[in-house]
Amino acid sequence: MMRLLCSLLLLALPALAVAEDFGQAMWGASPDDVRQAETRTNRTPFGETDYLIYEASLPDIHVTRLVYQFTAGQLSQGRFLFKPAPDAPVQSWIDQFEQVRHLISRQYGEPGSEEVLTPNADTAPVQMDWATALSEDRLILKTRWQTDRTELIQQLAWAGNRPYHQVIYRPLTPVSPADGLF
């Protein structure tokens, strides 16, 4: 079973990153450039100009979306948004966070930092109790990686009435719009 999961994760690596800065694009790309390069299903609401949403697929994750965000018509940030099945227990969000952490670490190496944020040290949950702490909005998990051009930040936190899991990609060095990059 573990061998099958590892094989599936290796097949999913291209979905998380390729030679590009995010998804199929380089920082500073236009929405038209991204539309031409992307082969995944476009889920962007009609008329939207500040972002593009594409469907992705990762093993054991119910929904994965790529979000290309644009500033002044140029790619300035990217996000992967993850969601397990609607009836999945809160622990599945913790498991999913660890699965994505492992997947990214296989590609970029161990994270530069890992944080378990709580309101104060007195309420810090032991790892066995992370699901309860997350559901009570007493826990944020955050992991960071860095490449030569991009910072990746994986976050899991409570948002409203459910967990929220994302990986944010952003350029390390903003480039001026005149250069064609941010």
Image (cartoon, rainbow, N blue to C red):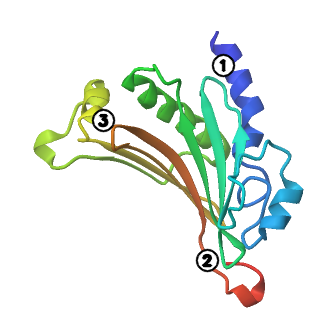
Furthest residue in direction bottom, as rendered: 178
Q: In the rendered view of the protein, which quadrant contains the C terminus?
A: bottom right
Point out which mark residue 173 bears. 2
User: How far across and down, in percent of the image, does residue 62 sit?
Assistant: 60, 27
Of badges 3 and 2, the one in the foreground is 3
3D distance between C-alphas at marks 1 and 2: 36 Å
Q: How far apart are marks 3 and 1 (CA)?
A: 26 Å
Spatial CA span between label 3 and label 2: 33 Å
Residue under pointer 1: 5
At 33% from the left edge and 44% from the top edge, which residue is drawn? 160
What secondary structure is found at the residue carrying circle 3?
helix
Q: Which numbered disc, 3 or 1, marks the residue closer to the eye? A: 3
Residue type, label 2: Thr
Check disc 1: other Cα within 10 Å, few if <14, some if 14-19, many if 20+: few
The amino acid type, in three-letter code, at marker 1 is Leu
- Disc 3 marks which residue? 134
Vertical order, 146 against 171 (above or below): above
Mark 3 touches mark 1? (CB < 8 Å): no
The residue tagged with tag 1: helix, strand or loop? helix
Pointer 3 or 2: first along the chain: 3
Q: Up-down: is 107 above or below 176?
A: above
Crowding around mark 3 (Cα neighbors within 10 Å: few <14, some 14 to 19, many 20+) is: many
Q: Is residue 131 above or below residue 144?
A: above
Of the numbered discs 1 and 2, the one sitting upstream in the chain is 1
Give the camera-side residue of 32 and 154: 32
Name which quarter of the figure residue 61 lies in: top right
